[in-house]
C-alpha cells in the first residue's frame, strides 16, 4: 500500500489494530502536550511564585475561548475530510484543506485583534485582582500575538490525522512540546523573562512545527496538498465544517463560562490561593483528559470513514473499544489522584496553604472521574458520524443544564466546597443522560444493513 492510499485501510483493517495505530500517536502527542503544560506550571510556580500560578489560571477561560474557535474549524474539517475520503471524493477533501487554512487565518487574526484591545477588562471580568492581573496580562499578550500560528498549527494537525498521517501529527506535536520544554527554562530562568518567557516559548515552538506542516502539505505527491483553487471559501464546506465543529466550539465556549464562574467563586470564598489551587488541579485533570482526547482523535477518522462508506458495524465496533480504553484511563486517573494527591501537588509549589487547598480540590474533582472517559467518547461518537445536533446537545447539557446551576446554587450553601463539588456532580448527571442517548443510537444502527460486511475485519 502506498502512502497516498493509506486512508483506504480505514475501511479494511482490523478495528483494534487501526485504533491502536491511530490513537497511540495522538495519545503520545496529547500526553506530551499536557505534560508540557504541567512542567510549564511547575517552572512558573517554582521560578516566579504562587501568585503567578493564580495569574496563569485566570487565562484559562480566554485560552478555552481561543480553543473554541480553533475547534470550530479543526474538528469540523477533520470529520468532513474523513467522510470525503470514505466516499472517495478526493477533490472535495482537498478543497476542505484549503478552506481550513482560509478560515483559520480569518478567525485567528480577528480573535487576536479583539482580545488584545479589550485584554485588561476581560481579565478583570475573569476574576483578576491587583496581585494577579500583571502576570495574566503579560502571558496573554504574547499568546494572542501568536494566535494565528496556533490556529493554523492545530487545524493542519487535525487534517494530518484524518488524512491517514497520525504519526506525522504526533511528530508535529512532539516537536512543539520538545522545543517548548527546552526554551521554557531558558527564557524563564536563563533570560529572567518570567511568565513572558513561558509564553514566548509556546509561540516559537508552534511556529517551528507549523513550518514543518506547511512543507508536508506543499508536496504535490501527497493525497491532500496545497494547490490553486482550494482556498476560496465554499458555502457548503463552511456550513458543514461549522455544523460539525459547532459541538466542540460550544463545549469550549461553555468551558470558558464555567471556568469564569469557578474562578470567581474561588476568588470569593477562598481568595487568590484558591484560584492557584484550581490552576494546579486543572493541569493534573487535563493530563488524563488529554489521553482520552487522544483516543477520541484516533477513533474519529475510523468512525467517520466507515460511516461515509456505510460500514456501520465497524463504527459501532470502534466506539465500543474506545469506550473501554477510555474508562481504563479515567479509572487510573481517579486512583492516582485519590491515593497520592499531596506528592503530586508538591511538584508545583512548596507553599503549605496552596498545597492544602489543592489536595482538597483533587479529592473532590476526581470523585466520579471514571465516568468521564465514557462520557467523552460517547459524545465524540455522535460528532464522528456527523450527528452534530446530538453532540451539541450532550456538550451543552453537561456545561449549562447541570454544571452552571450547580456553580450558582451550591457555593451559596457550602462555600468553597460547593465550587469544587460542582464539576463531579455534573459529570455524574451528564453520564447518565449520555448513556441513554448512546444506547438508543446503537439500537438504530443495528437495524440498518451495512455495505459489504467483512467479518474478518471486525
Image (tube, rainbow, N blue to C red):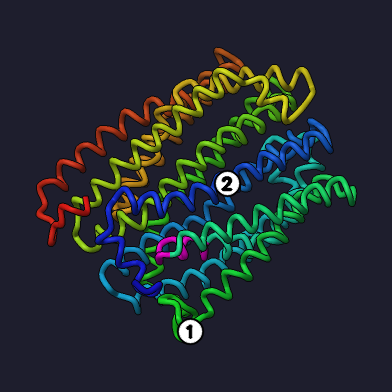
Q: CA distance from mark 2 to mark 1?
A: 32 Å
Residue 331, position in %: x, y? 44, 27
Residue 120, position in %: x, y? 75, 47
Q: Verify whether residue 156 appears in magenta.
A: yes
Tell which of 196 and 391 is nearer to you: 196
Can you say which quadrant of the picture contains the N terminus? bottom left
Is residue 69 positioned above or below 412 on the image? Answer: below
| Left or right for 358, reference 190 | left
Nearer the observer, disc 2 or disc 1? Answer: 1
Is residue 452 positioned above or below 54 on the image? Answer: below
From this viewpoint, which residue is outermost toward the bottom?
228
Q: Residue at x 45, y 41 (%)?
A: 292
Q: How would you rate the neighbour count of disc 1 (Cα within 10 Å): few for under 14, some for 14-19, many for 20 or more?
A: some
Residue 256, position in %: x, y? 56, 42
> Quadrant of residue 401 in the image?
top left
Q: Residue at x 56, y 13 (%)?
A: 414
Q: Secondary structure at mark 2?
A: helix
Tell which of 122 and 166 is nearer to you: 166
- Quick check: can you spot residue 411? no
Residue 64, label in figure = 2
Q: Secondary structure at mark 1?
A: loop
Over which residues does the magenta segment extend?
155-164
> Quadrant of residue 115 in the image?
bottom right
Amino acid at each position: 500500500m502506498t502512502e497516498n492510499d493509506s486512508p483506504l485501510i480505514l475501511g479494511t483493517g482490523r478495528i483494534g489494530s487501526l485504533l491502536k495505530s491511530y490513537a497511540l500517536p495522538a495519545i503520545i502527542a496529547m500526553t506530551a502536550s499536557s505534560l508540557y503544560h504541567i512542567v510549564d506550571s511547575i517552572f512558573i510556580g517554582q521560578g516566579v511564585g504562587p501568585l503567578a500560578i493564580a495569574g496563569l489560571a485566570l487565562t484559562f477561560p480566554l485560552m478555552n475561548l481561543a480553543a473554541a474557535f480553533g475547534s470550530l474549524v479543526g474538528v469540523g474539517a477533520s470529520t468532513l475530510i474523513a467522510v470525503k475520503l470514505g466516499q472517495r471524493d478526493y477533490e472535495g477533501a482537498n478543497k476542505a484543506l484549503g478552506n481550513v487554512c482560509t478560515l483559520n487565518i480569518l478567525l485567528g487574526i480577528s480573535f487576536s485583534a479583539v482580545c488584545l484591545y479589550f485584554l485588561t477588562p476581560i481579565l478583570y471580568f475573569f476574576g483578576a485582582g491587583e496581585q494577579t492581573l500583571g502576570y495574566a496580562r503579560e502571558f496573554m499578550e504574547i499568546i494572542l500575538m501568536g494566535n494565528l500560528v496556533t490556529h493554523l498549527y492545530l487545524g493542519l494537525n487535525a487534517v494530518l490525522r484524518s488524512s491517514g498521517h497520525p504519526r506525522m501529527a504526533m511528530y508535529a506535536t512532539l516537536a512543539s512540546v520538545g522545543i517548548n520544554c527546552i526554551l521554557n527554562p531558558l527564557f524563564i530562568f536563563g533570560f529572567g523573562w518570567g511568565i513572558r518567557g513561558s509564553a514566548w516559548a509556546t509561540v516559537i515552538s508552534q511556529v517551528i512545527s507549523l513550518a514543518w506542516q506547511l512543507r508536508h502539505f506543499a508536496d504535490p505527491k501527497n493525497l491532500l496538498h496545497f494547490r490553486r483553487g482550494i482556498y476560496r471559501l465554499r458555502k457548503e464546506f463552511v456550513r458543514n465544517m461549522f455544523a460539525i465543529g459547532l459541538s466542540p466550539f460550544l463545549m469550549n465556549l461553555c468551558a470558558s463560562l464555567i471556568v469564569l464562574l469557578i474562578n470567581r467563586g474561588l476568588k470569593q470564598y477562598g481568595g487568590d490561593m484558591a484560584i492557584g489551587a484550581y490552576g494546579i488541579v486543572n493541569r493534573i485533570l487535563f493530563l488524563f483528559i488529554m489521553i482520552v482526547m487522544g483516543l477520541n482523535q484516533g477513533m474519529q477518522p475510523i468512525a467517520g470513514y466507515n460511516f461515509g462508506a456505510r460500514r456501520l458495524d465497524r463504527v459501532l465496533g470502534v466506539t465500543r473499544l474506545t469506550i473501554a480504553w477510555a474508562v481504563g484511563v479515567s479509572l487510573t486517573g481517579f486512583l492516582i489522584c485519590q491515593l497520592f494527591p499531596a506528592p503530586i501537588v508538591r511538584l508545583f509549589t512548596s507553599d503549605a496553604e496552596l498545597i492544602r487547598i489543592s489536595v482538597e480540590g483533587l479529592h473532590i474533582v476526581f470523585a466520579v472521574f471514571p465516568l468521564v472517559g465514557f462520557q467523552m467518547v460517547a459524545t465524540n461518537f455522535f460528532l464522528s458520524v456527523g450527528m452534530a445536533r446530538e453532540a451539541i446537545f450532550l456538550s451543552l447539557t453537561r456545561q449549562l443544564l447541570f454544571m452552571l446551576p450547580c456553580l450558582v446554587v451550591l457555593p451559596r450553601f457550602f462555600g468553597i466546597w460547593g465550587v469544587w463539588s460542582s464539576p463531579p456532580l455534573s459529570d455524574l448527571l451528564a453520564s447518565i443522560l449520555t448513556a441513554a442517548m448512546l444506547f438508543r443510537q446503537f439500537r438504530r444502527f443495528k437495524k440498518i444493513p451495512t455495505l459489504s460486511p467483512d467479518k474478518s475485519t471486525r
